[in-house]
Amino acid sequence: MKAIKKIVLYSNFRLKVILPSYGYNAIILSREKVADSKVWILE
C-alpha cells in the first residue's frame, strides 16, 4: 500500500503508522483499533 510508509509495534500493543504525507509525524493506533486495522490493511 503506497499510502503507508511503515508500521511499527508501539508500546502496550499499539501500532505506530508512518505516512509519507505526514512527514515526521505518526499516527498511533489504540489497542482496540489494531485488530480492525490489520484486517483492513490485508484486504
Image (cartoon, grey):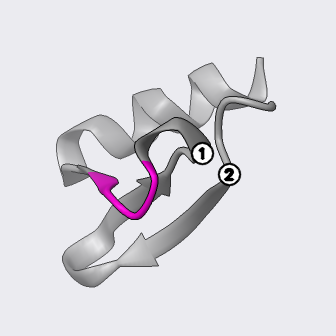
Q: What residue would you read off at disc 1?
A: 20
Q: Is residue 9 above or below residue 33?
A: below
| Label ID, residue 5 | 2
Label 2 crowding class (10 Å Cα cut-off): few <14, some 14-19, many 20+?
A: few
Q: Does residue 32 appear to the left or right of 14 in the view shown?
A: left
Along the polypeptide, which appears first: circle 1 or circle 2?
A: 2
Q: Where does residue 3 sit, x and y in percent of width and height?
A: 67, 30
Q: Is residue 41 above or below residue 16?
A: above
Magenta segment boundaries in residue numbering: 23-27
Where disc 2 sits, the SS reads loop
Q: Main secondary structure of the magenta part?
A: loop
Total label count? Answer: 2
Q: Is residue 36 above or below residue 21?
A: above
Residue at 40 percent of width and 64 percent of height: 24
Q: Are marks 1 and 2 in contact (CB under 8 Å)?
A: yes
Label 1 crowding class (10 Å Cα cut-off): few <14, some 14-19, many 20+?
A: some
Residue at 19 percent of width and 49 percent of height: 30
The three-letter amino acid code for the residue at tag 1 is: Pro
Does the magenta run of residues contain 18? no
Mark nearer the viewer, 1 or 2: 1
The three-letter amino acid code for the residue at tag 2 is: Lys
Residue at 42 percent of width and 43 percent of height: 22
> Which quarter of the image is occupied by the N terminus?
top right
Q: Where does residue 34 sit, x and y in percent of width and height?
A: 38, 44
Q: Is residue 9 above or below residue 18?
A: below
- Quadrant hosting residue 42: top right
Residue at 39 percent of width and 62 percent of height: 16
